[in-house]
Image (spheres, coloured by chain):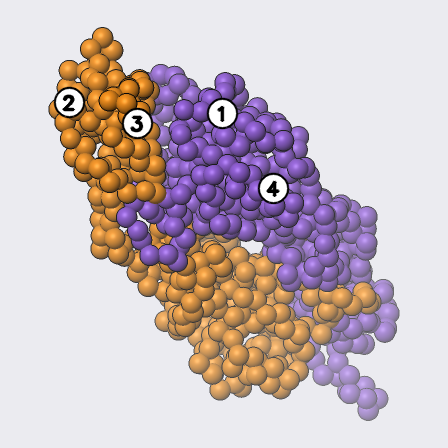
Chain colours: A orange, B purple
């Protein structure tokens, strides 16, 4: 048996804090807006012009002088001469003076002189033959106050206003803002490249036929899907052997090419736990190798060749949880997220959970809302395969250490993961 | 003024139901598993082998005959001869008989003859010099029942079990299952291609300099981000003019190339509402042109050239809501989702909302969980720009028609949109 060096246990929070000290933002890159969805902005975005940048009509109708229609009613309409038609996208040429009106479309610039717009529904247009020139007059049947249906310049957004802070993730709303301000290209953080290694000589590649005593490598694909959901670019590597020299070479080669290396398996203290052996001989700095959590107590991390190496437990459930707790915040932080750790929420436990634990437990959970209350139950308690139940999880339930379990209806903290 | 043809109002539910009759699944395509994340499976996935496919040890320890250790205790250890070491990934060569044990790793196949595995922690290994041959014996210090720490064949998954039904979206858990069963390539539905048109001669392309009376086209980018979030492939088209002949040509050309066409703007009854004019003259079938909802009452849809054309209101808030209510379910259904419409949840309104409405209102909302309860407030009620508040929405709040508004603390239905 190889040397089992002592392990100092630290909390999940401490482990996250240690890791966060080594996070480096990726460099920035410029991409077309239409290819930038879900990416994060590399700088603050300020308004370089007000919105609207002209007095904008909010309705279809007539731009008039409010003083002209103060007394207007269905029985006593104000009759005004229509001097111009202003479709949206055009610029009015004429000033509206007392006694006149301009027909105006939603979104079009309100002409000088006009100080309110009356909705079409409150008007009647009448042909007017005036000195042989075809023209129009309009009856305004309602008085509206000055300013009605006009959005003033900067009524929505003031120039120089901060619109989107650095790190904002570009969703539909952000895309609309960026387009409005002319960002056909945006500067975003590059997606962190994350190499994924599984360990164990029992692992077959996914395309290989099944063999006695061996299983296909599934953790790497699970982790790759998690990496992409976190905003990273996953690189699935050939599974690591149980030979520590080979592992050292493979990891060193890879560390130089990516932003983060994640391994699964090989971190407990069995004969063939190759990452344990590696950490006993490598030139990097071991950050921690035991975390006060179940599953995944032997989760380890190192800083090596200027890169982070995160080593998760090999069990699929432990790998999944370890990724969500440690790798996802790293990837989000590297790609610019200002709040990479999910916020805790309170939920009601929907079933009894009778397992106590010496360490806090992070249980994969499935939430639903019932009558306005958030309820949660452990995922897959009715399933015999951990792996099959991973797809059902939408949160991690944090159960404190100690005790003999938790009763249905107790309030627990959960961390959303979708 | 052009003819304003009569509009028959239908409910959101009816509109969705009408649209769903015209949904066609996209064709299928085969993609590498690592490129298939978030796509939907085109067929059911069954287990073609049991999991585990061999009797698997759940711990590091010794595989023994339970009968040999029935009386074992620290004071009275059972002493067994170690006949083999079984790393995971190998196949045991020797049968464990009474009086013998095999050292076994987590995940390795349990040898024939053995009917339980004792954890390493409950054993002591001792060197044994036997007739000049170096060998090992092990002291077992605890009895464990038959079957302990062995997962039987099919203990997790039975062969022929349905693992993932058609339409499942491939996330981390699904990826792990697919890898386990050798799916290095998966058959998924092609992403629906969705063409996006905005209408209005006031629209500038995003890369153009601002001009008096004109604004940049932001709806198209917002909708494109929504399309991609829904699982589609967005194709942003040049904005449509106000000329109905040109619009007809542009739409006809595009309908032949995509799975769905979405327009924003041009559906109300103003002078330049070009989609209204188009629906009055085109050879397609108008499905509806008025929906009992605010915003977006004039939302329209047509079936034309064997494709769906969905025409949303032009206001950014109305476009956003109309997309979520109608386009997202279409895109999800086309790409294989078995439940394309989001399920309603109950939440507590967090502020007074004093606007009644003749039609049900779909208000962009922002949720948070407080003490286990889901609370929601309209997004951006403190903001002067609708567009700026779109990014804050994570649900639609459905407020029934009528009345004079809703009070803080009332329960409302919400539909998550993220």
Q: Which residue is mark 1?
A: B291
Q: Which residue is mark 3?
A: A61
Q: CA distance from mark 1 to mark 3?
A: 23 Å
Vertical relation: B349 (above or below) B221: above
Q: Which quarter of the figure has residue A146?
A: top left
Mark 4 vs mark 1, foreground winner is 4
* Callouts 2 and 4 in the same chain: no
Image location of residue A42, percent across then percent down: 36, 65
Helix, strand, or loop for circle 3?
A: strand
Q: CA distance from mark 4 to mark 1?
A: 25 Å
Vertical relation: B50 (above or below) A98: below
Q: CA distance from mark 2 to mark 3?
A: 15 Å
Q: Which residue is mark 4?
A: B252
Q: Residue at x 73, y 65 (%)?
A: A206
Marked residue nearer the N-terminal end (2 or 3): 3
Q: Which residue is mark 2?
A: A68
Viewer-closest of B140 and A27: A27
Q: Are marks 4 and 3 in contact (CB under 8 Å)?
A: no
Image location of residue B68, percent across then percent down: 79, 64
């Amino acid at each position: 048996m190889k040397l089992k060096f002592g392990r100092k246990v630290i909390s999940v929070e401490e482990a996250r804090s240690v890791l966060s000290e080594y996070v480096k933002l990726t460099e920035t890159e410029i991409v077309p807006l239409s290819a930038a969805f879900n990416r994060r902005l590399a700088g603050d975005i300020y308004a370089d012009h007000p919105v609207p940048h002209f007095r904008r009509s909010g309705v279809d109708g007539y731009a008039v002088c409010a003083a002209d229609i103060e007394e207007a009613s269905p029985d006593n309409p104000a009759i005004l001469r229509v001097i111009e038609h202003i479709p949206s996208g055009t610029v009015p040429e004429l000033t509206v003076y007392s006694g006149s009106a301009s027909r105006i479309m939603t979104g079009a610039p309100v002409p000088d002189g006009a100080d309110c717009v009356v909705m079409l529904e409150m008007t009647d247009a009448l042909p007017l033959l005036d000195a042989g020139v075809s023209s129009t007059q309009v009856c305004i049947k309602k008085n509206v106050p000055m300013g009605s249906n006009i959005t003033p310049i900067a009524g929505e957004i003031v120039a120089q206003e901060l619109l989107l802070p650095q790190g904002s993730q570009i969703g539909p709303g952000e895309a609309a803002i960026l387009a409005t301000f002319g960002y056909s290209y945006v500067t975003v953080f590059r997606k962190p490249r994350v190499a994924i290694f599984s360990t164990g000589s029992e692992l077959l590649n996914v395309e290989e036929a099944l063999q006695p005593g061996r299983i296909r490598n599934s953790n790497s694909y699970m982790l790759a899907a998690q990496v992409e959901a976190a905003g990273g670019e996953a690189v699935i590597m050939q599974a690591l052997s149980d030979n520590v020299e080979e592992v050292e070479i493979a990891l060193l080669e890879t560390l130089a090419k990516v932003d983060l290396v994640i391994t699964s398996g090989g971190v407990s203290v069995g004969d063939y736990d190759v990452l344990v052996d590696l950490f006993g001989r490598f030139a990097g700095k071991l950050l921690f190798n035991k975390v006060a959590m179940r599953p995944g107590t032997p989760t380890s991390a190192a800083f090596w060749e200027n890169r982070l190496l995160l080593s998760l437990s090999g069990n699929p459930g432990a790998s999944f949880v370890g990724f969500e707790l440690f790798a996802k915040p790293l990837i989000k932080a590297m790609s610019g997220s200002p709040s990479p750790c999910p916020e805790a929420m309170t939920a009601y436990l929907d079933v009894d959970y009778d397992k106590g634990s010496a360490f806090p437990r992070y249980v994969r959970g499935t939430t639903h809302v019932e009558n306005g209350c958030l309820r949660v139950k452990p995922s897959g308690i009715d399933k015999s395969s951990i792996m099959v139940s991973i797809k059902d999880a939408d949160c991690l339930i944090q159960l404190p250490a100690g005790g003999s379990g938790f009763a249905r209806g107790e309030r627990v903290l959960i961390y959303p993961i979708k």
